[in-house]
Amino acid sequence: DSEPATSSGRTFAPPSARRLARELGVDIAAVDGSGPGGRISEADVRAHAEGGGGDDAGDSGSDEAPAPTPTDVGSGGRKSAVKKRGE
Amino acid sequence: MVVGDVTTGTEVLVIGAGPGGYVAAIRAAQEGLDTTLVEKDAYGGVCLNRGCIPSKALITGSGLAHEAGNAESMGIHADPAVDMGKMVEWKDGVVDRLTGGVEKLCKANGVNLIEGEASFVDEHTARVAHGGEGQGSESIEFEHAIVATGSRPIQIPGFEFAADHVWSSAEALDADTVPDRLGIVGGGYIGMELATTYAKLGADVTVVEMLDDILDPYEDDVKRIVRKRAEELGVEFHFGEGASEWSEGADGGYLLHTETEEGEESTYGVDKILVAVGRQPVTDGLDLGNAGIETDDRGFVETDDRTRTAVDHIHAVGDVAGDPMLAHAASTEGIVAAEVIAGEPAAMDQQAIPAAVFTDPEIGTVGLTEEAAEAEGFEPAVGEMPFNASGRAMTTGHTEGFVRIVADDETGFVLGAQIVGPEASELIAEVALAIEMGATLEDVAATVHTHPTLAEAVMEAAENARGQAIHTLNR
Amino acid sequence: MVVGDVTTGTEVLVIGAGPGGYVAAIRAAQEGLDTTLVEKDAYGGVCLNRGCIPSKALITGSGLAHEAGNAESMGIHADPAVDMGKMVEWKDGVVDRLTGGVEKLCKANGVNLIEGEASFVDEHTARVAHGGEGQGSESIEFEHAIVATGSRPIQIPGFEFAADHVWSSAEALDADTVPDRLGIVGGGYIGMELATTYAKLGADVTVVEMLDDILDPYEDDVKRIVRKRAEELGVEFHFGEGASEWSEGADGGYLLHTETEEGEESTYGVDKILVAVGRQPVTDGLDLGNAGIETDDRGFVETDDRTRTAVDHIHAVGDVAGDPMLAHAASTEGIVAAEVIAGEPAAMDQQAIPAAVFTDPEIGTVGLTEEAAEAEGFEPAVGEMPFNASGRAMTTGHTEGFVRIVADDETGFVLGAQIVGPEASELIAEVALAIEMGATLEDVAATVHTHPTLAEAVMEAAENARGQAIHTLNR
Ligand SMILES: Cc1cc2nc3c(=O)[nH]c(=O)nc-3n(C[C@H](O)[C@H](O)[C@H](O)COP(=O)(O)OP(=O)(O)OC[C@H]3O[C@@H](n4cnc5c(N)ncnc54)[C@H](O)[C@@H]3O)c2cc1C
Ligand SMILES: Cc1cc2nc3c(=O)[nH]c(=O)nc-3n(C[C@H](O)[C@H](O)[C@H](O)COP(=O)(O)OP(=O)(O)OC[C@H]3O[C@@H](n4cnc5c(N)ncnc54)[C@H](O)[C@@H]3O)c2cc1C
């Protein structure tokens, strides 16, 4: 029910986001990408897993171990300049 | 010493120590799994011993000799003499250092190494037969297995491999003299890499190919550049002809007989015949059936995107698991197999697996061609940069070829690239990253590229696709 | 013919046709702006005529001759003779083709070309003086201007450039014979590239450097590899010594006199002296003051991130606008200048501008070093892959050096890389894209890299930083 990012329906997301999606049991094709052209970031995957896309979080087809609790994604107090680049 | 029939246990049994198997074993050990790697022949598999590495070594050596001998226009006068035995010795040294390294890395990561030939007894047991002096066998009980037994060259009827006249690529990489005349059956990438190598070493090379061009999977303009250059090097091509048989020639050499589909026959006088018509999976003696695994009609083991066979706890990686039969695909699959076994969320989910051909010039490709992009439903935007407009290419003296980049017109996402030209094998890496990252043409064009480099041509091709190239006229 | 004092008008006036200026002019014309480019000397500027391109051409030529003459271990026996005049002729041919191309590309994009020396009359008027036969001058009224007048080599007192004995890099790139003994003042990148070139061509090279090592901005382990290799090639280094004067030697050559800070003197017998101690901006005769623009105390024109000078509608790009004094920085600034003038949202907002040194081995760097990352408040994760563990490096016969990648430990974002080794200048491109894309170590490690390539070392370094390298022991 989510718009395919491109005419071909292919999902554009970096390897780290794709792996995270598997880890969280999220179907990456169902995630709304916030990047240019609908590119999906790790943050998009987390947002989806944390509630945005409850309707499809369960149908990921993953038969991996149950999704582990996401590790703390907050900055944990430590300042990192990279964060300034935006998610 | 005879090794008795002891039974040991391991969490992960890896069969075959090629780039699929040894990488899988190291990663499995890194994941904390008790891992055993069985190899019957030589660490590093085909790739390190008689594939990627030896071929690239001889390509370097023959390339250097040829280039130095043809650089008068640069003011360099040299008449290099090649001692083929010595060159092969140097190549062997490279192989030894690398295969020794593989063994050391396995040990350093805690992988148990066993020399011998493995076969399945049942779903959780393998038997390893030790050859040579220490004959005997042992049983190994495993929780998970990774089959990485690789491939071997296909023989065609009437052309049994024999070092004195009918070579496989393995013999071609181990010759101590350069034949005056070399006949090559097959114009695929292995045949073409060796055709280039031997032509540069001074052999008269004749390539016989059933299809009507070399390098079947590539686009016409890519093939043309490589074929033209090979012809300049003196390689003679005969397309639409299949090798039918060989016979002894009157001059001490051999005659290679060919036949077209229409039955037209030809004969070529040669001193060696290299058959390079493809590779087939190695599963004989493995008794896969005992583990409940079947092979497909071409003999390959089928796997899913987690590299699992039909039997969930047994994985297969590399050439034995089918296309793409490339070392880096094997290694990637090996890593995925090890991580999946360790419970990690790994999968073969790459957007694209690059490939290179080390001809002169090189070919590097990744992702979709324009045609493939259309077939997948994209409206492709395509940009090109010819190397003869590249400052760096000119300063290297190698200006043949081009970079072509293919993107989705709507979003700008990079979908693929076809590069033919100097260092194409290296240049493709940036595009592979672009594809995996979901980079757009604009991202590639806006990334500052060092001047003068060949990599600038990737940027220029991206600019060209956007109608903004500086060093080519935009189309 | 005397060109009268006509006045023409243009939307964009670009002064200087180096990589800053000609790229700016082409992009401005592509943006639909009426653009005029004035060049007083040669299209392509320093870079194409006596910088990047000629130096890289001679590096190729000398490298090929040297490599072929030292490949006995590969089984290649050659004793190459270099005809320096011919090599320089070949280099000139490359330069001519490229500079001719620049002229053609300008015209094809609709840029008006004027040959002559430009100076500012006021904020909106420039005068172009034509030299040679067609003497005279013309006035040009402009809406926007882009100053791209570049730089020239710094002369040190007592060492006026003169082709017969005191060379600048320009003369070193135009010599028709190889001096027996070459003294080089300055161990920066230009000095070191030429030291390598001439050492390979057979000169006895002596490098005198005030600082205590070569290549000041680079890390110690990077410098060490290049210095050691130069020493192997016979280059002699004298650190902590400044050139004080030269005199004629008894043997028909010259004596290069140096002095340490403590006043200790030394003398080296040489046949030519190359002074390569840095470059200074070219603004003399430009009358920048007439346009209301001042230069800083080193003579550079200050600009903001849109390449604008203090006078908003006048931009400055390239070497004249200060560091980094590199061709690709100049071109990037040129594009930004043109786009800003056209009203586009362009800016010099790159995360990183790569740089390369074409010594043996090459150096390629981009972004932050470990130290710089710490200074910026990151907790860096660092990974390395030495080329002596790279299969591809071994097959090329060049295994010195390493890839080091620096990332933010917390997020994994790639921050920089330092590469020293074969094709470092090309390999850095992938890391530059990684940095611009905000790629993580995992992204780089998970991108499949073709085997066997040098680019695999980038992937391995990323894996090493994550404690997951296959081909090195993880730290
Ligand atoms: C001439 C040539 C050039 C090539 N160049 C390139 C190139 O440039 N780039 C590239 O990517 N690919 C190249 N390839 C292909 C590459 O070599 C293969 O894709 C790669 O080796 C596959 O790796 P693998 O681990 O699957 O199998 P292999 O490398 O074939 O290794 C399999 C190993 O398993 C062992 N084995 C088999 N059965 C058993 C058993 N029952 N018990 C124990 N051990 C067993 C074998 O002895 C072997 O060591 C080239 C191939 C050739 C022939
Ligand atoms: C030996 C050497 C090797 C180098 N190698 C590299 C390398 O490998 N990579 C790299 O990135 N950089 C390299 N550089 C540096 C590079 O050449 C410069 O960074 C680059 O040329 C700067 O470009 P530019 O457009 O700012 O100026 P320039 O290239 O200096 O061009 C300025 C132009 O302006 C013209 N001009 C000046 N004043 C006027 C006027 N009043 N009216 C009209 N025209 C005028 C000049 O004639 C000249 O053509 C090298 C430099 C040298 C000397």
Image (cartoon, coloured by chain):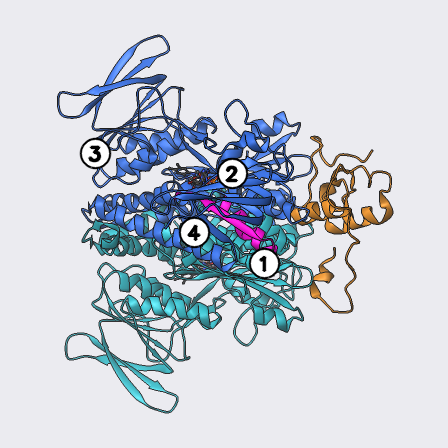
Chain colours: A orange, B blue, C cyan
Q: Horizontal and vertical percent for residue B48?
A: 40, 45
Is ligand 1 less than 8 Å from the beta carbon at label 2?
yes
Quick one: A78 or C358, which is closer to the camera? A78
Is ligand 2 less than 8 Å from the beta carbon at label 4?
yes
Q: Which residues are magenta?
A: B21-41
Alpha carbon distance from label 4 to label 3: 50 Å
Q: Nearer the viewer, mark 2 or mark 3?
A: 2
Residue that mark 1 sits on: C125
Which image quadrant for residue C147? bottom right
Label 2 marks which chain's residue?
Answer: B
Residue that mark 2 sits on: B318
Ligand 2 falls in quadrant = bottom left
Alpha carbon distance from label 2 to label 3: 33 Å
Disc 4, disc 2: CB below 8 Å?
Answer: no
Residue that mark 3 sits on: B179
Confirm whether residue B384 shows in the render.
no
Residue that mark 4 sits on: C43
Is the residue marked by circle 1 packed among few (<14), some (14-19), or many (20+) residues within 10 Å? many
State the SS at label 4. loop
Q: Determine whether, in the image, residue A61 is placed left or right of residue C381.
A: right
